[in-house]
Amino acid sequence: MYIGVTIKRYRAVKEVGQIKMSVGIIAYYQLIQVCQAEYFRQLLKPVT
């Protein structure tokens, strides 16, 4: 009984960890895309 509960809890924690990791990775890639867009925008500005 106790072992079953522990396994269930472990699986739940593992799933939450994977979800958090996925969200973190998506946020990281979005940040990189924004930075790249801003970099190229600055790069393509006409020099005065």
Image (spheres, grey):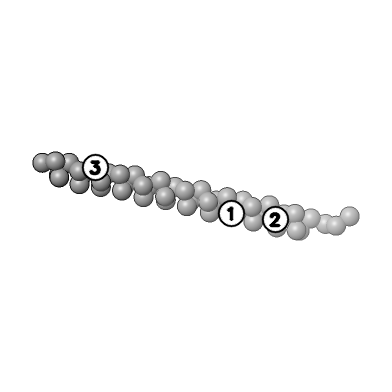
Sequence order check, earlier mark of 1 and 3:
3
Tag 2: amino acid: Tyr
Judged from the image, the secondary structure of the residue bearing numbered disc 3 is helix
Judged from the image, the secondary structure of the residue bearing numbered disc 2 is helix
Taking 6 as reference, is 1 left or right?
left
Q: Which mark is residue 39?
A: 2
Q: Is residue 5 above or below residue 22?
A: above
Tag 3: amino acid: Arg
x, y percentage for residue 35?
A: 64, 52
Q: Which mark is residue 32?
A: 1
Q: Which quadrant is home to the C terminus?
A: bottom right
Give the residue pinned by disc 3.
9
x, y percentage for residue 26?
A: 48, 51
Tag 1: amino acid: Ile
| Residue nearest the observer in this picture, 38 or 1 | 1
Q: For the point 24% across and 42% down, which residue is it?
A: 9
The mark lying in front, picked from 3 and 2, is 3
The mark lying in front, picked from 1 and 3, is 3
What's the CA distance linking mark 1 and mark 3?
35 Å
